[in-house]
Amino acid sequence: MIVAVDGPAAAGKGTLACRLAERLGFSYMDTGLLYRAVALAVLRRGVSPRNGEAVVDAAHGVHAAALADPMLRSEVVGQMASQVAVIPAVRAILLSCQRRFASCPPKGGAVMDGRDIGTVVCPHAECKFFVTANLAVRARRRVNELRERGMSAIESQVLAKMHERDQRDQERVIALLRPAEDAFILDTSEMNPDVALSIALTYVAQKVAASI
Ligand code: DC
């Protein structure tokens, strides 16, 4: 079984996807980390995200060990990830890796967390969620997250950057951020993570029951 969890930054999809995987005994893949790994390689090489050839070269050089780098979680890398993600050749390189994982997960099933899982990577996923929340709530959550990690953050700046990233992810010509037609929309603006998990688990159980 494949569970797709898509949505914008800081909507709560990472937390939900991780906890779903744990509860279902499935393998979890954070596909954003792949884009972040390419972005970090691009930053370290000092190449422009507009230089498609150099970015593709960096994408070919990314391997599993790069996914453990703590720098991947930084805001700068997140912004760059959204820029390299508009390049079709980069998406193609990462697509095959995501599909391989989804079709042959180490555990019984896969929970895939991303932007285009339900629409492009795994359009046949049995269960699809689109997790969202309003921009102000997401910016607040990200600020709290950064401060908990000991980093300073100015809410208005985080909000502006998040808005910019949303727009880029929603307007790119390929694999844009949007809910799949058959996705369950989960708005977490006024919902705590436990409630979101419980709603999602009920939906997965309904899907499993319907497939028997
Ligand atoms: O989920 P995240 O914040 O780690 O993702 C970082 C960027 O990577 C995001 O702004 C867009 C891109 N991305 C993507 O285009 N497709 C995915 N499946 C996952 C992430």
Image (tube, helix red, strand yellow):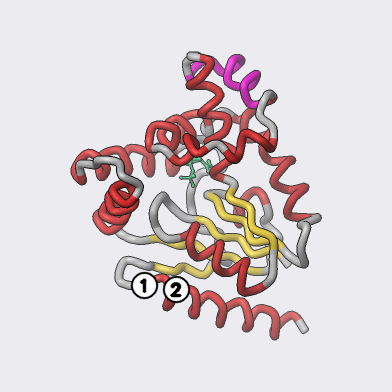
Magenta span dominant secondary structure: helix
Kindly identify the residue that appears in the image at 38 percent across and 44 percent down: 166
Q: Is residue 50 magenta?
A: yes
Horizontally, residue 210 falls left or right of residue 165, namely right
Q: CA distance from mark 1 to mark 2?
A: 6 Å
Q: Which dot marks residue 16?
A: none
Q: Quadrant of residue 113?
A: bottom right
> Mark 1 = which residue?
192
Picture coordinates of residue 97, whole percent (x, y)? 72, 41
Picture coordinates of residue 18, whole percent (x, y)? 56, 62
Location of residue 205 with respect to 4 vertically, above or below: below
Badge 1 element: loop
Q: Are marks 1 and 2 in contact (CB under 8 Å)?
A: yes
Q: Residues within 10 Å of mark 1 (few under 14, many from 20)?
A: few
> Mark 2 = which residue?
196
Q: Quadrant of residue 62?
A: top right
Kindly identify the residue that appears in the image at 65 percent across and 78 percent down: 207
Magenta span of residues: 49-59
Picture coordinates of residue 134, whole percent (x, y)? 30, 59
